[in-house]
Image (tube, rainbow, N blue to C red):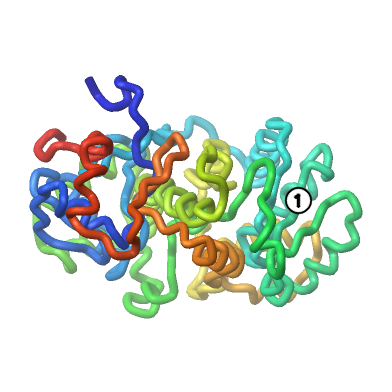
Amino acid sequence: MSPIEAGKPLVKSINDTYSKRLLTFNNYNITGSVGNFHKVKGFDKYNSLLDINSMFSNGPRFEPVDRTQRVLGPINYSPERAWRVPDRELSLELALEQRVLDLCSTGEKLNLLWSGGIDSTAILVSFLQYAPDLTQCRVVYSPWSTYEHPDFFKLLKTIDKIELVDTSGEFYLSSTLDGIIVSGNTSDEIHASIDKSFLETYGYGSLSMPWRDFFYNKLPDDRFIDFCDWYFSAAGRDINTVLEARWWFYASSKLTSILNITNLAFFTAGPEWFDPKRLVGFFDCDVYEQFIYYNIDQLIPSDDYATWRQFLKDYCYRYDGFEDWRKNKSKFGSNQIQIYTRKKQILNNSRNLMLLDNGERVATDNLPFFSAAEWEPLKEKYQHVFRTPYSV
């Protein structure tokens, strides 16, 4: 009987600081590493997924969790939103409107995390335009949010119905948020996770190269190319260029893992039990995929990093009219709200090995020091979250 059939909780997120030791303590044979993730004997397809990761990043973050369920790794992750080939194209406006209405239909308070960046501003613009009742919305921001986009913050302060909460100061020490947390996390992944370092190393022209040529130059292994052909076929559309391969890999294998790790960090300061589904990635939904699936060529339309996700900046401009932001705003690592979250995490000394899909957190008394002896008392209870090698 599988763990799912047995009703046992599965992994939502593992702290990657401890992942190698957990694998070692469970007698896996680690054969190599890609960044902070580890190849394991008996999981050849998963190991090839890590090799795809190495095509795009030498120091990848967030473990691949394959939405197609074709490639299962050593960790038994909780099933996430499965990959489904979109069967119709939605416009950007219609996709964003539908996503807002779906979230509003929950009847829950909606905490919109706003960093001041492209993704979070597009989310706010979507709610400002389409939410039936703005009193359902709460904008959670930090001082850095206002520095990153001061004009938009001035606009927000003119809207009486929407609640504004500064997450700095006493808030991160004493307050918790009721309702649903709506984050821009998953936006990088659904938009092919293009970073400046890749473009600086390989050039803008590399995005239009045949992916087979690009991959083979980095890893001349016919078996690896055959695996990629097989894996890319699950996309339900042609994957020809490096840009298309980037989009497919990040959308199919990294979209869920970024929320998994954010769950672990975000909620460690909260109550001992919580529903991980409270944290929602705005762009992690079928309706947005029905837009992006047919518009991959629009992800970065010119040889200028500032044009990555230009369509989202244009969308915001049609609402707020901030021309300079539309032309010049570039992707930026917006970690301000997470900084306050992690301060709260440290102050509460709530470091964890893993988070399960029932909200249970697995820890030992002595983290961050973690030994085989400390894992042994937990091993029997949580052995089901590890798959047996050669079972895939």
Q: Secondary structure at mark 1?
A: strand
Check the picture and name the quadrant holding the C terminus: top left
Residue at x-position 45% and y-position 34%:
358
Residue 252 visible: yes
Disc 1 marks a residue whose amino acid type is Arg
> Is residue 28 found left or right of 241 in the rendered image?
left
Quarter of image, res 17: bottom left
Is the residue 98 above or below the residue 279 in the image?
above
Count of picture labels: 1
Name which quarter of the figure residue 10 lies in.
top left
Q: Which residue is at the front of the view, 351 or 11?
A: 351
Q: Is residue 64 above or below residue 104?
A: below
Outermost residue, bottom direction? 200
Q: Residue at x 22, y 52 (%)?
A: 22
Residue positioned 90% across, 61% down in the render: 158
Query: Residue 199: x and y, percent?
Result: 39, 74
**Residue 235 in sight from this viewpoint:** no
Q: According to the image, label 1 marks what residue?
A: 138
Q: Observer-nearest residue: 374 or 144?
A: 374
